[in-house]
């Protein structure tokens, strides 16, 4: 070897030594350029293996005379099985003239297109397997490959193996960091149920991992609106706020974010210079703000929830050009936060709906007071005006109206407090009562309803089961439980038992209806909870909640036992008192 050649090889090895091994694309291009210089070929390329289907793809090719880069050609094993067999079994494939090699005839079209004669291919291994092929191609004439050529080719293939190993390690470390980052974001978002706070967290957490600037735009299928925007620097934040205020909300306007929404796809602008921005249709004021923000590269990815587009995240960097890997990471981030943002939005929506329902019930409870008061006065006047003695039917009707009007008036007060979810005392007035007699009276009031529903009511009660309680409140408890049995046990018997066990007065109401699913038993007394579908059974989900509140106010307890298809049993236990002597 001459001194000049030796110096060239030393210089080349130095270039390889200082090469940034974490930048695979740049390093690969350098290896191909060096391959052309050292081995003296016109063309050098690296082909990577893929398994499904078995094939090799030109990851990068270099043409020395034109300083041209190529990529993307695919060769399947099915098209050239002999070539694949050779490259898997030999350390080096040196062919002086490809036109005289029968096993390479399937590649004749590729050779003719590029005027290739000599071929020097070396397998490249990584992580214990065949990763690719380093290919050297002599053009316009056959070429005899010397031992020195093959030695250099093997050295360069080993260099590529080292680069691939480094890339694999970098990729694994980067994937681990990104996975940890996504997990941290999920944990942070899971701790907040405020949509505004959640949007701010999304854009702030994206910096500086994904860029120097991040904006989040919401979308409902027709219109777009700004949710949050963040910049790594306070001065930049002011410019960004101005940009979003002036150009961030028009779904039909220019800009990468709204274009991504319209086209339903991720978009990447690798170089956001003035000519590119002007060609994208941006107004001059828009361009001026982006230039002032020193934006170099921009990418927008869609935020989705349940296959619906709910927004777009846009990232911008001042010091790097985004690539496809950055886009994939941004898409993973958007996918991670999409469901969490949607859950936050739905929670806020549900809270607003509950607040509206509470306001309505509170208003309804207050508004009912006036007509109920008038009804009570009218009943009193009616009772005084009846000729004594009134007919028994008329007397029973008037007494029932009076009793029910009083019950409704007291129930309205309870509904107002239950709707507000107040923890204070309910408006109850305690006195000594016979629970058995009260249950019998309310059951008689329900008699016609049970008859129409085809329910056979069976009441068994001990005499004088005395308690200290509020008559109207306990009537509400009994009425709600009977109404529940009537609603879910139509046509089936309803069994009612009132008895005293030592110091406990126990009311048991058992129906033979549809029952309650086991997973809902623990929450049937919660406010607005529905044990069954509201589609088939109406109601607000307040009845059992109010019942439980009243029972608790009597220092008692209520529980339920049920199995689907076997009905439900509600048990109310109250402190009993001794009957009068």
Image (cartoon, rainbow, N blue to C red):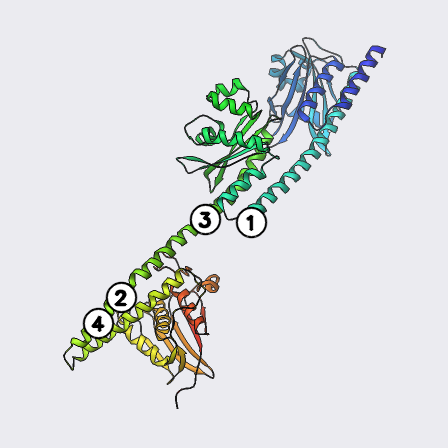
Q: List the single residue furthest toward the bottom.
A: 581
In the rendered view, does 166 fall on the left or right side of 392? right
Judging depth in this view, the residue of 507 and 378 nearest the camera is 378
In the rendered image, the quadrant that contains the N terminus is top right
The Cα–Cα distance between marks 2 and 4, rounded to whole angstroms, is 10 Å
- Label 1 sits on a secondary structure element that is loop
Label 4–label 1 contact, CB within 8 A: no
Judging depth in this view, the residue of 231 and 92 nearest the camera is 231
Using the image, tell me which numbered label, if any, was put on residue 191.
1
Question: Picture coordinates of residue 35 (x, y %)?
Answer: 73, 17
Q: Which sits earlier in the primary sequence, circle 4 or circle 3?
A: 3
Q: Which residue is mark 4?
A: 379
- Residue 389 visible in rendering: yes
Q: Which residue is mark 3?
A: 348
Question: Picture coordinates of residue 580 (x, y %)?
Answer: 39, 88
Give the label, 4 or 1, closer to the camera. Answer: 4
Q: Which sits earlier in the primary sequence, circle 1 or circle 2?
A: 1
- Vertical comparison of 197 with 261: above or below: below
How crowded is the residue under tag 4: few (<14 C-alpha within 10 Å), some, or many (20+)? some
The Cα–Cα distance between marks 4 and 3, rounded to whole angstroms, is 46 Å
Q: Which residue is mark 2?
A: 372
Q: Which sits earlier in the primary sequence, circle 4 or circle 1?
A: 1
How crowded is the residue under tag 1: few (<14 C-alpha within 10 Å), some, or many (20+)? few
- Label 4 sits on a secondary structure element that is helix
Q: Residue 123: which quarter of the image?
A: top right
């Amino acid at each position: 070897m001459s001194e000049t050649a030796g110096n060239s090889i030393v210089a080349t090895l130095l270039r390889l030594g200082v090469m940034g091994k974490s930048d695979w694309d740049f390093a690969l291009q350098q290896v191909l350029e060096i391959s052309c210089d050292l081995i003296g070929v016109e063309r050098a390329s690296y082909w990577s293996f893929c398994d499904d289907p078995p094939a090799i793809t030109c990851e990068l090719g270099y043409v020395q005379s034109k300083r041209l880069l190529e990529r993307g050609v695919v060769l399947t094993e099915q098209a050239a099985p002999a070539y694949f067999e050779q490259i898997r079994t030999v350390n080096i494939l040196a062919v002086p003239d490809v036109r005289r090699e029968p096993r390479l005839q399937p590649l004749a079209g590729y050779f003719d297109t590029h005027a290739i004669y000599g071929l020097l291919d070396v397998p490249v291994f990584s992580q214990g397997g065949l990763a690719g092929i380093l290919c050297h191609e002599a053009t316009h004439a056959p070429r005899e490959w010397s031992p020195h050529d093959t030695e250099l080719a093997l050295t360069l293939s080993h260099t590529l193996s080292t680069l691939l190993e480094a890339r694999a390690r970098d990729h694994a470390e980067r994937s681990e960091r990104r996975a940890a980052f996504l997990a941290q974001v999920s944990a942070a978002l899971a701790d907040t149920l405020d949509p505004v706070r959640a949007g701010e967290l999304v854009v702030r957490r994206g910096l500086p991992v994904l860029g120097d600037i991040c904006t989040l735009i919401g979308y409902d299928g027709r219109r777009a609106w700004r949710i949050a925007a963040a910049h790594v620097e306070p001065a930049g934040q002011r410019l960004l706020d101005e940009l979003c205020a002036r150009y961030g909300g028009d779904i039909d306007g220019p800009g990468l974010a709204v274009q991504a929404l319209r086209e339903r796809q991720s978009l990447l602008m690798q170089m956001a210079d003035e000519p590119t921005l002007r060609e994208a249709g941006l107004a001059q004021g828009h361009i001026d703000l982006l230039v002032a923000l020193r934006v170099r590269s921009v990418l927008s990815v869609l935020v989705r929830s349940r296959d619906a587009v709910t927004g777009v995240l846009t990232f911008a960097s001042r010091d790097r050009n985004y690539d496809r890997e950055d886009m994939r990471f941004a898409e993973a981030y958007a996918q991670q936060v999409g469901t969490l943002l949607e859950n936050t939005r739905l929670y806020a929506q549900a809270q607003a709906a509950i607040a509206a329902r509470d306001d309505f019930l509170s208003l309804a409870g207050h508004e009912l007071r006036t007509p109920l008061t008038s009804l009570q006065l009218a009943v009193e006047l009616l009772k005084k005006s009846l000729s004594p003695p009134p007919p028994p039917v008329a007397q029973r009707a008037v007494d029932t109206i009076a009793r029910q009007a009083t019950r409704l008036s007291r129930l309205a007060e309870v509904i107002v407090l239950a709707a507000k979810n107040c923890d204070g005392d309910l408006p109850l007035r305690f006195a000594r009562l016979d629970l058995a007699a009260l249950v019998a009276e309310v059951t008689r009031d329900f008699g016609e309803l049970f008859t129409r529903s085809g329910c056979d009511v069976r009441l068994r009660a001990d005499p004088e089961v005395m308690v200290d309680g509020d008559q109207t409140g306990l009537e509400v408890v009994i009425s709600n439980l009977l109404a529940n049995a009537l609603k879910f046990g139509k046509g089936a018997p309803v069994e009612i038992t009132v008895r005293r066990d030592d110091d406990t007065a126990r009311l048991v109401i058992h129906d033979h209806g549809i029952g309650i699913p086991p997973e809902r038993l623990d929450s049937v007394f919660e406010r607005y909870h529905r044990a069954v579908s509201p589609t088939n059974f109406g109601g607000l989900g307040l009845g059992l909640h109010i019942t439980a509140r009243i029972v608790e106010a009597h220092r008692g307890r209520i529980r339920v036992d049920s199995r689907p298809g076997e009905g439900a049993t509600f048990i109310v236990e109250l402190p009993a008192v001794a009957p009068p002597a």
